[in-house]
Amino acid sequence: MRKISITIAAVAVAVFSAACWSTPEPVNKAGATSPPPSSNTVVAAPVQTVAPMPKIDLPPAVSNRDLSGDTVADRANRKERSDVRPNSTPQPLQFKPAPENSEMAVTMQSDGLIVETRVFKNHPTLARAELSYGKGDRSLKVTLHDGRTATVNAEKVEVLRDLKAAQIIAMASK
């Protein structure tokens, strides 16, 4: 068994070395083979030229938006949500306890906007605060017990849970 494997290995080495040591015969333009060059001559490879690409004039694009208002890039980056049925009603918010006798919930709307909602149970002035962010902007909507609402820019607010009620009222009164 060992002699057979050694013989096969020797034959394989001989075949590969013969393939590596042989040189192709140069062919002239007439198609005839010429004698192999001497050791000090250099054979140049033929030079191929590539024709330039023809210029194509395309009509200018009218718009990259389709009828729904989405850009082509928006459609390419859109992901289908497999966990939500399109005709079902949204799940109710799940509130969890938060500081200053309030409750907090976070949800994501279908357009990707994240909304943090904080409801104050027994604050004398403040009823509700909603921090919305996504697509580059952040806004805070404050609702008071008397029904007035104020929407302010909240670029410096990271998390609604960290704000005190007095800070929320101060932001809304600006």
Image: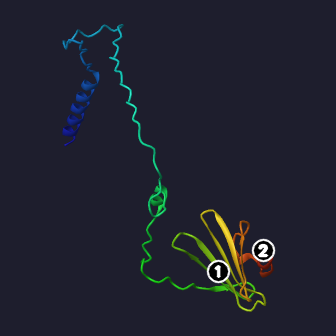
Amino acid type at circle 1 is Thr
Q: Quadrant of the N terminus?
A: top left
**What percent of the width, then of the height, locates residue 14?**
24, 28
Above-or-below relation of 127 to 65: below
Mark 1 and mark 2 residues within 8 Å of each other at the beta carbon: no
Total numbered badges shown on the rendered structure: 2
The residue identified by callout 2 is 171
* Residue drawn at 42 percent across, 72 percent down: 82
Answer few, some or many: residues within 10 Å of disc 2's Cα (few below 14, many 20 plus, some between 14 and 19): some
| Nearest-to-viewer mark from 1 and 2 | 2
* Residue drawn at 41 percent across, 36 percent down: 57
Amino acid type at circle 2 is Met
Residue 48, picture quadrant: top left
Circle number at residue 117: 1
Q: Earlier along the polypeptide chain: callout 1 or callout 2?
A: 1
**What percent of the width, then of the height, locates residue 108?**
55, 74
